[in-house]
Amino acid sequence: MRGGESSVSVRITAVIPLYRVEPYLPDLLGSLRAQQLGPYELDLVFIDDGSPDASGDVVERWLPTSPFPARLIRQENAGVSAARNRGLDEAAGEWITFPDSDDVLADDYFASVARFLVRDAHRLDVASARLLRLREPNPTPEDVHALSFRFAGGDRVVPLSAHPDFFQLNVASAFFRLGDLRRAGVRFRTGLHASEDALFVAEYLLGLPSPRLGLVAGASYIYRRRASRDSAVDAFRTDQRAYFERFEAGYEPLMRSCGESGVPEWLQSMFLYECQWLLPVQLTPDGRADVLDEEGRARVLRALGACAVHVSESRLFGYDATALPLESRLLLQLLAGRDLPRWVGAYAVSEGGEILTSTPMRLGSAVAVTCSEGSRLPASAVDTVVPDYFGQTVLAVARITTSSPLRSVTVDGRARRIVRARRGEQLAEVTDRDRRRRAGSWAIPAREGEVRVWKPITGPDAGPVHRLRRLLRVARRQLARTINRRRRGR
């Protein structure tokens, strides 16, 4: 036992799969050796999943020097899910966690989590540590994860039913009660090529009447973005199945299983978070899914539509964990078989001395445009663009370039509000600001390609000091954004 702070301690098993991580293991093992004393007992279960390098041998040589009880289990290669399931079977702790073997744990990681669990375990179902990114070759961890806003309020427990944007996706930085997992029969899904950990978390939480997430702001889990770009996260982009299997075999069956009780909003938010990393990048040269053939693209769209059916319109446009662009949300709305909301506008921005007005619409809609002096623009002046999201054919954007502001834009006979950019605003900022006004939320409008949402602290139990710090940080960012907009708008 590594104790000294409390007569009460928690027993934790860390299950660590090994596969092609030989160069990174010394960092993880060093961080395990450096763990501070705290109210916890820790045992380590390493699963060598048939790794073709010397990962298992590195751990085997380290075991005699481990400050904690530790063992190595070797098995034929069966995938990370099978390795974690083996660890589930072998674990003996009260709590279980699944660190990745190429990551690093802060020196006070287990001590901070243990103190939190001693104090608040009775109020939560799963605990989560803060994620910091180590982007090689930069040696300094950065607090840049898209979901870092969850920790801005310090240590706290959040009911997911009231705060659906505070969901948990990964298991590497999460802690579960082992007994609860075994009673529920929750296992990692084998055969999937992406999001198997998110689906594990979702399946577990769906079995609870009112799931509660404990946020351990003082515990830092440092995840590595490899310079070699050969991790599972990077590799999925070269595998066709990773694009649709997680939706076909994962999210959609889970959502459908909710039946008449409806899909909880936190699960809807998890699906939309997946879309954040899937849809916007399709319009970029580096992110486009060129690995997919025509049937693969069609499968992605069918799978997204089947999931989007289970996402309410209020959640689709109110989701605020990341800055999912309005265009992506509108595509999901159409894939779900619903009409675009009536509040969707025509968005006007200044570009090179001219005004570009863009309005999203269903492909095939009729557009009529009236200039400021009252004359009607010919149909040839309207450029219809079909954004190439996996070859979709439901969403289009009408674009009109003029030298003066338009008087009106109608789509299929219905007038669209013309939403004009503030000085220096980009199109993405205008659309995000308009959506937020409709959803009743406030944040600094997101720019093109931005993922993080900059807003005041949300959720319960955040003290005044945390709230003030966050407000000052958001205010500084807002001021810098305003100055840059004005410079661009000169």
Image (tube, rainbow, N blue to C red):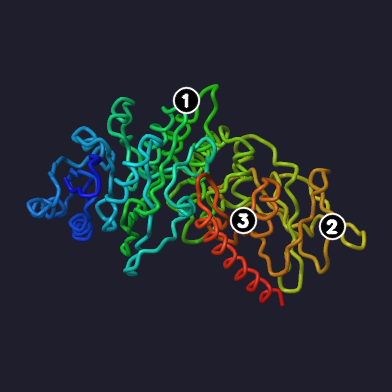
Q: Secondary structure at mark 1?
A: helix
Q: Secondary structure at mark 3?
A: loop
Q: Name the amino acid type tagged 1.
A: Ser
Identify the residue under disc 1.
257
Identify the residue under disc 2.
378
Identify the residue under disc 3.
443
Residue at 56% from the left image edge and 64% from the top image edge? 472
Q: Is residue 46 left or right of residue 473?
A: left
Residue at 45% from the left image edge and 29% from the top image edge? 253
Q: Residues within 10 Å of mark 3 (few under 14, many from 20)?
A: some
User: Which of the 4 image quadrants contains residue 81?
Assistant: top left
Q: Is residue 158 left or right of residue 62?
A: right
Who comes first in sequence, dot 1 or dot 2? 1
The mark lying in front, picked from 1 and 2, is: 1
Q: Do residues under tags 1 and 2 come within 8 Å of each other at their CB atoms?
A: no
Q: Name the amino acid type tagged 2.
A: Pro
Mark pair 2, 3: CA separation: 38 Å
